[in-house]
Image: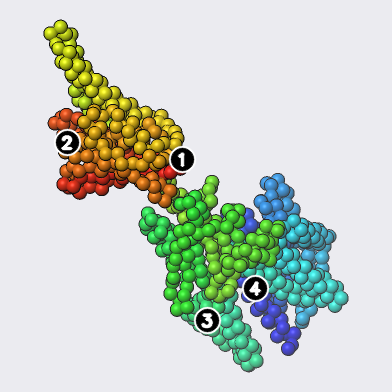
Amino acid sequence: MTSETLNLLGFILTVTLACFLWVLAYNVFVKNKGGYLNITLALSMLFAGSWLVSGFIEKILSNPSNTFTLWTFRWAYATGCLALFFYFLFLLGLYLGRPPGKRALIVLSAIALITVAASLSPWAIQNAKYSEGNLASSTGILFIWLSLFVICFGTASIYLAVAKWRRSIGIDRARTNIILCSLVFFIPFILLFSLALPAITGNDIYTSYSFLAGAIPIAFTSYAIIRLRLLDVRIILRRTSVFLLNLLILATLLAVLMAVISNVDLSPTTEKGIIFGASIALISITPFVWKRLERFSSRVFFSGLYDYTQLKEAVKESIYSSSNPFQSIPSTLRELIFPLGLERLGVLILPQVIGEHGILFECWRSEDDSLQFRVDEEYITPDWFFRIEASTITEEVQRWPKDTWEKDLGEKLGAREISACIPIKTSTKSMGHFLCGLKTSRRALSVTDIKCLEDTGEHFAFYIDNYALSSELNVRVKELEKVYKDLRMADEFKAEIIQVMAHELRTPVTIISGFAQVLVDNWDRLTEEDKLSAFNSLYKACLRFNNLSGQFTLLTDYQRGEVETRSILIKVRRLIEDTCDVFDTENRKRVDNRLGSEDFIFSDPEYLSNILRNIISNSLRFSPLDDPILVYGHEEEGVYCLYIQDFGKGIPVEEGDKIFEPFVRLESVLHHTQGTGLGLYIVRILSSMLGIQIYADSSPGKGTTFKLVIPMQDSASSL
């Protein structure tokens, strides 16, 4: 291959690389116009591209003039120094983790402007000429300034890269290593072709080949962007690749045409006409070629790309499509899994966020590429999930762990085939995580993928937080409703107690006052028998009064939580006898006590007696006067079963579930001489306090049997 051909290929390559850098610089800048790193890297690429087109001067014109050659040299030094300057600022920002101060920028910018002015002045590059394959130049005194600028900023760039590499850990260190390698390979190449070979041969034509070294930082930077997620410019690279391929095709066609024309004897006018016509033809087919290349590049360059803005809107709409997370989360996972190219995608809601347990929503592709879904509402969440506060890429913590914690985390995530864990959190609270499976292409997650999940996570966190708050609010509302209902029932209960008490106490009070008045007014005229009968009536009225006041006092103490129980060993037969002592002689005779003399239980004698008194009193009242009330019992598997049986009318089936409720007879209280409607309600309360189970077996017309299941051991509780 002749030097002429090599120069032609070199010219095409440098121009192509320059165009690639310009397009890449534009897209990097547009991606984040306010970002310091994007701005400085874009400017470095812009001036690097301008520097590249200065190469192979002999191919720009067939016989360039000395003036053109001179200004090409000056332009190359000016743009090269600016490219180096902005690349230095880019590395400085990476090292500091922030933009440098304004004073430092002003000083550095002033030095760069002075250098550019020196490059364009006759005191740096005095003369330059090209003739028959020889390129020669002469320098002035300011060329020393240019050399010092390149040496100082080049050395400073390497120092910053090394310093950043030494202080970096994890993925940052890997990115810095790539940048450092690009400088290590690029600078020797420049020194060889820009200084060494021209000094040895006396021909500056070799400086043109130094421009080919521009491919080195481009390649390394592209790798850092694609593989190590240096910047979110993946879509930029694909668009740039389309432009580059289109330019290569057109440039190749034009180069072939020029090579053919140069070997054919044609007049200058004809050559110009052919070149002009070919250029018009190439321009006209450019849109067609561009469309074809876009289809090709979408399959070859980053085939998994998607419209991030469109996907973001679709995901946002899916999240807020339902107020129920068990509907919106699955639909959102279905929206994400195909564009992201994942085999599996899940959402883990941490315990205590929605419920007591962790909740795992998981979506995956089956063999026929259909989607499967499951929800684990009692997911056992490992403790290490609570320590993940930032987006974690499994490959990064496996290959470049910052500490032993990250190393262990990488092993745990890898064991679960999780390629990334993206937090779902608000500014103050962590709600859960996205759990990403492997990609179907086995490629790594890109910056765009991670950013998409992080943005989605913000919406999810807001949504879940609102759901949790609304759920908690609903619980509080229900609690308040229950409290209000209880208060209203308590108020109604108090009102009913007052009404019942007013009515029930009226009878004994009337009896006491009436007989007392009779005794006072007619004491001398009454016989001893009449007096005894009156005193007996007074005694019964007092007993009834005492019983009523005891019931009301017990209910009042119970509602205030002041009822306490005590358990002692009780002889059951004796307890029944003592309980029946409060009844009159006729009613005492009706109670048939069939209990054994050796039957013992543990319980509170006072409250158990109250239970028995209410049940027996109820049985006596609602059974014929000639029928007995049977009381019997036996021990059975650690409990004592006590039965109270009457032979009255029994309880209607529809009323069976209501007999232990308060005031079940309130509608007829005004028409009944005795009974507050609280007796069996008190039985239910005291039974629950003493740990006694109570059942009522009744058949209409056959009577009712109450069964008390009493623990044999001390099981009483205190309230």
Q: Dot 3: few (<14), some (14–19), or many (≥20) neighbours within 10 Å? A: some
> In the image, which is nearer the foreground, mark 1 or mark 4?
1
Q: Is residue 518 visible?
A: no
Q: Sequence-wise, which precedes: disc 2 or disc 4?
A: 4
Q: Which numbered disc covers residue 714?
A: 1
Q: Which residue is mark 3?
A: 282
- Name the colour scheme: rainbow
Residue 293 image point, x, y percent:
52, 78
From this view, report whether residue 394 is shown above or below residue 320. below
Q: Residue furthest right?
A: 200
Q: In this figure, which residue is indicated by the disc labeled 4?
A: 17
Which quarter of the picture shows residue 191? bottom right
Secondary element at image label 2: loop
Label 2 CA crowd tier, 10 Å (few <14, some 14–19, many 20+):
few
Q: For mark 2, what is the residue? A: 625
**First in residue order: circle 1 vs circle 4:** 4
Q: Amino acid at mark 4?
A: Leu
